[in-house]
Image (tube, grey):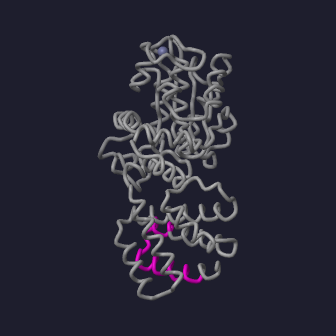
Amino acid sequence: MRFSEIIGDKKIKKKLVDEVRNERVSHANMFIGPEGSGKLQMAISMAQYMLCENPSKTDSCGECAQCKQCAALTHPDLHFAFPVVLSKKEHVESSDDRRTEWNNLLLKKRYFNLNQWQIELDELGKNAVIGKEESRSIMKKLSLKSFSGRYKFMIVWLPEKMNLTAANKLLKLLEEPPEGTYFFLVSNSTESILPTIISRTQFIRIPALQAEESVKFLKKNYGIDEQLAVSVIGFSQRNINEAIHLVEGDNSYHVYFDLFVKMMRAAYTANPMDLMDITDQITDLEKERQKNFIKYALHILRESIMLNYMKGKLVHLREEEKQFLSKFARFINNRNITELMDEFNSGFYQLERNANPKILFSDLLIKLTKLIKRGV
Ligand SMILES: [Zn+2]
């Protein structure tokens, strides 16, 4: 992929291009930034730029044989290592055994996170790792001469998923990279990466995507209108993986909005029948949607605070939401916001751990009745 085809900060793209042009690219790099900031795509674009036969001052050409192979993810010097669920039965030992699925997803969706990668393989919830066979495979690939006669790239997606054996082997390679090899590690968080690995790498920081740019991307690629795109980006907190997932899988904003309004009314009046009724309506949703509803509620609470304390900066809402919040937002303030957010966050956490939704939501509603009163 070319830089012009991916979303991301122009300044960062220019910085990466300049590093290449000034021959300052380190052999071991860590693309680090929040989830859904397009780091993997930045790393691939940078590799393509370095392999391109006719690069311009700002981008790869997209026309030469190298670019075409990169775009199709078939370039023999562009290697990937990523977490997989190891399985004897299915003969999965390393990412080589999942490379077809990987290419398909990357070409089809371009932006995805570990959960979405696992959903694609129908392996959600199973432990995906970069294991010891992976390190053997990496060494083998990098010991070969580069096909293009130039560079080889090893893009390691989520090095935080490496087990200790793999990490130690990678460390050796980072210390003495094979001739012409560039490592692009792509990580959401360095917390669980060996400090010795971190200290060997040059950090390339990728910030969260700009809302405007992401909105444009969703409109263009998913044919949704401005209002919905703005709302989805706000809802997903500028995480493009999440935003795409929502647009593709769950378009139920009006349902969530309705439920949220009913939930808050029931909490305000504390009418037992209304409380029971809304609990039933929420728990009738599928579990993934129950979780999305909670995320939606958190989004509306955040926006209420924005409305109260940063007047006019309310940019992540649709019209019906704005109208509702113009009356409702005053009930959400410094007397209850922290606890409200805590309760919803805790609800989400419990749902992920298979709590009983009926108990969870009726409990949440009882707490809401108290918390809403406190804000009045
Ligand atoms: Zn090219």
Q: Is residue 374 magenta?
A: no
Q: Is residue 80 left or right of residue 56?
A: left
The answer to which image quadrant residue 198 occupies is top right
- Image x and y of residue 263, in percent: 47, 75
- Image x and y of residue 246, in percent: 42, 52
Location of the C terminus by quadrant is bottom right
Q: For the stretch drawn in magenta, what is the main secondary structure?
A: helix
Q: Is residue 359 magenta?
A: yes
Give the residue at x 39% y 59%: 252
- Residue 4, above or below 63: below
Give the residue at x 40% y 72%: 282
- Image x and y of residue 72, in percent: 38, 25
Q: Nearer the viewer, residue 222 or 111?
A: 222
> Number of callouts in the render?
0
- Residue 180, above or below 116: above
Q: Nearer the viewer, residue 176 or 61?
A: 61
The answer to which image quadrant residue 284 occupies is bottom left
Q: Is residue 11 left or right of residue 84?
A: right
Extreme residue in the left direction: 89
- Image x and y of residue 318, in percent: 50, 56
Give the residue at x 63% y 41%: 207
Give the residue at x 52% y 24%: 153
Query: In the image, which residues are magenta?
Result: 348-370
Q: Is residue 197 left or right of residue 253?
A: right
